[in-house]
Image (cartoon, rainbow, N blue to C red):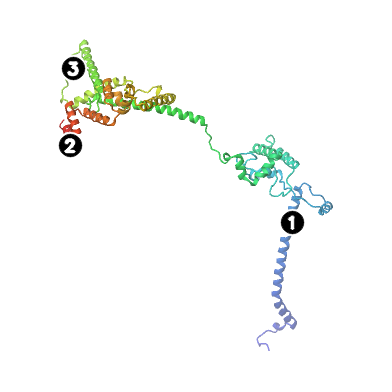
Amino acid sequence: HPPQNVDSASLLFSNSDLFTMTVNARLAPCRRVWCTLLLLCVVVFSSSVIVVAQESDDSAAATAESGGSSSGADEAKKNEDKPQSPKVKQDNASSTSSEDDWGSFYDPNDIFCGKYDCYKILGFDYETWGSAPPTLKEITKSYRGLSRQWHPDKNKAKGAREKFVAIAKAYEILTNSEKRKEFDYYRERPDEYFQKYGSSVLWTYAPKSDATMISIVLFILANVFTYYAQKNKYDKVANHLIRAAVEDWSAREGGSTESIEIREKALAILTEKRVKEIEAAQSNGEAPKKKEKGPKLTSKERREKEQLELRPICAKLVNEIDDFGAGFRKPTYKDLLIIKMAKWPYYLGSATLWWSKYAVRRMRKLELNAEEREVLTKNAVGEVAWAASSDEERATMVTLELWISDNLVEWREEQDMIREGLSANKRKQMKKLRKKGGGGSNDYDDDLHLD
């Protein structure tokens, strides 16, 4: 029983309406599922249609590129029963537009096509033709098409000339039966390629230099070096002689008879110069210069002033000496390496001949002649000491038989005492003390100290 306050219009629903509402409420979830399935089917069907259409376009393009090479369906059926040989894969001409498509080959000496594959250059793939390599006719056909495409007169693209040359080279190799056979053989045998064409094909030196030019430059530098080495040798002795003359060195300090003579000449020139200056001043009516007032110069300062005046005079006198002896001379063309090398055979032959004669005379037990004594003495004392000695000193050295070691040691000790400034009597005393032995060296040091 309905409530008392409900209006009668709300009770108009019949039993059939209530049934319809119940059925619709139960079927609502089923409709949603079917709608979803239907939508998925539409999406799948549309995707399939797009894929099929794309494949059809690709097939049509491939058919167009083949240029009508395939015949109709009837001809295909006729050829189904016949045995088919593997097709040679030949790319179209556009595939050779890039050198990246030319493959690779071990040919560092450019015997064939360099680093590229000759087959690939002409559009053939060595890896896919199997037992049916391209024929001479196919190679010629490919070459003609590619050469027309990349001919420099027709193709102005960058690198067209290089591609045309590479195509011509590949055609030359593949149309030569011997070259092609060798090319195929070395494809998988780089070790035998190395054995045949040598190791020089493995590398190149860049930049390449002309060995002749390098040798000439080095030889010129060697001549310049020997010239300036002689000049440095001369300058070293000249500077020492100038300093010894200017500073009036004694024999103990490193002076020599030459430095003393140069100093005496320089003093004479300086005195003459001063006299001429006084005479010139008197002839012009000038009064002699008075001594400037001021502190007197010390002996050291006067000596330094005199040395400053003597130095340019001594340098001029020393530079007039061309040869100091013992090889210390001014450099000339004779000091160039090429001149010395020209003289080496003569010097070597002369030395070999002299020492051969000396050996023969020693085996015959003959006495030393004058020439042998002089040569042996010169070798013993050294070229410098020999050149610095006078003729009398050289004759004395020869008589002392200095090629004997004991005599040479005694002579050198005496020369040391002479440089130290010891008198003849003192030198005799030193010799006696040394022969007796014991304390001789100490007495020698004391005598030097007292002197």
Residue drawn at point x = 21 percent, y = 13 percent:
281
Which of pointers 3 and 1 indicates the residue nearer the eye? 3
Which of pointers 3 and 2 indicates the residue nearer the eye? 2
Q: Check disc 1 and give the amino acid type.
A: Ala
Q: Identify the disc placed on residue 99.
A: none
Dot 3 crowding, Cα within 10 Å, few <14, some 14–19, many 20+? few
Which quadrant of the figure contains the N terminus? bottom right
Q: Which residue is labeled 2 in the image?
A: 439
Q: Earlier in the sequence, mark 1 or mark 2?
A: 1
Q: Position of residue 276 (x, y in %)?
A: 23, 14
Number of marks drawn: 3
Q: Position of residue 109 (x, y in %)?
A: 60, 39
Q: Earlier in the sequence, mark 3 or mark 1?
A: 1
Question: Mark 1: which secondary structure?
Answer: helix
The residue sitting at the front extreme is: 364
Residue drawn at point x = 69 percent, y = 82 percent:
10
CA–CA distance in space, label 3 to label 2: 62 Å
Q: Check disc 3 and give the amino acid type.
A: Lys
Q: Position of residue 261 (x, y in %)?
A: 24, 20
CA–CA distance in space, label 1 to label 2: 125 Å
Q: Identify the disc placed on residue 53.
A: 1
The residue sitting at the bottom extreme is: 1
Q: Check disc 2 and give the amino acid type.
A: Gly
Q: Earlier in the sequence, mark 3 or mark 2?
A: 3
Question: Mark 3: which secondary structure?
Answer: loop
Whether label 3 touches label 1, CB < 8 Å? no
Q: Which residue is labeled 3 in the image?
A: 289
Q: Position of residue 332 (x, y in %)?
A: 39, 22
Quarter of the rendering containing residue 385: top left
409 or 24: nearer the viewer: 409
State whether residue 71 is above or below residue 391: below
